[in-house]
Image (tube, rainbow, N blue to C red):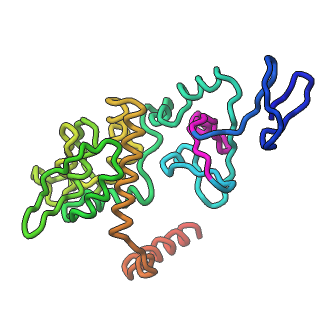
Amino acid sequence: YIIRNDGIRIDLRLPNVQKHLQPGYKVERHVQDGDIVMFNRQPSLHKMSIMGHRIKIMPYSTFRMNLSCTTPYNADFDGDEMNMHVLQSMETRAECSEIMLVPRCVVSPQSNKPCMGIVQDTLLGSRGFTSRNTFLEKDLVMNLVMHLDRFKGALPIPAILKPKPLWTGKQIMSMYLPNVDLYKFANGHPDDETDPLSPGDTRVEIHGGEHLCGMLDKKVLGPSSGGLIHVIFNEFGPQGARAFIGGHQRVVNHWILQRSYSIGIGDTIADARTMDDIVTTIDASKKDVK
């Protein structure tokens, strides 16, 4: 609406109404792509329950958001309702974009560690994508690099040249990793392992943005202190962390779409030994209670 000084409202949707403006008129316009809004899920339990988002107008009446933002909101997609607050003054917009915007909330002031990480499909795909036996043919590599923000136009030298060129997932990963160093252990790393080659590929090493070895799983990509996202945030700031999370999701999600994975009913059934353990534990507890 255009709200005139005398309180009359002129609807902006009407096509042939004269929409002239005078000093003192208020313009209540529609939200547009790139507007900054505050987004909130109740109950608001900590600072990250309300964050600033830069929006994109899409069809239908559903709020959509990046999966990595669901962790601080504690949101899941089973019918949750959320609130959006559209900011009305330039001062609030400035505060929201400088203080509350999602990239600035990646590292939580509560615990000085990230409160967002890689989750769900991207986390599952990351482990497979950076596994030692993942090799990619040229057509898939070309489709993956299309998702990169800054692609220089040159592919790395393939890891395997004959009989046909094959690239590893780690090579593609190195194309969008910022220049950071990281030395960590993935889940399942044996305590007594001293072999620098790490037979299980659980020793994660990143040198100068080059992913040398190790599978990336929740220990590296999750919201952990000293993890990859924490290091990138400290070295390259909120926008560096945002760019990495976005790029990683696009590339890995495209790869897992090509590779695919499935879970059958058989995968949810415990084996006989596990069932025996469960029954024994419950029986013992019942005896203790008696």
Query: Along the horizontal axis of the image, is 12 left or right of 146?
Result: right
Task: State the count of labels.
Answer: 0
* Residue numbers of the magenta segment: 34-58
Q: Nearer the viewer, residue 250 or 99?
A: 250
**Residue farthest to the left, as pictured:** 162
Residue 109 screen position, x and y as percent: 49, 29
Residue 258 screen position, x and y as percent: 34, 68
Query: Along the horizontal axis of the image, is 127 left or right of 71?
Result: left
Magenta-span inclusion, residue 241: no
Q: Residue at x 58, y 35 (%)?
A: 52
Q: Residue at x 35, y 43 (%)?
A: 149
Residue 221 screen position, x and y as percent: 35, 47
Q: Quadrant of residue 242?
A: top left
Q: Residue at x 92, y 23 (%)?
A: 6
Q: Nearer the viewer, residue 72 or 90?
A: 90
Q: Nearer the viewer, residue 103 or 23?
A: 23
Give the vertical position of 28 relative to 139 (above or below).
Answer: above
Q: Work out which quarter of the rendered image holds the C terminus and state it.
A: bottom right
Q: Is residue 55 visible?
A: yes
Give the vertical position of 211 relative to 254 (above or below).
Answer: above
Q: Is residue 134 visible?
A: no
Residue 72 screen position, x and y as percent: 54, 43
Q: Work out which quarter of the rendered image holds the N terminus and state it.
A: top right
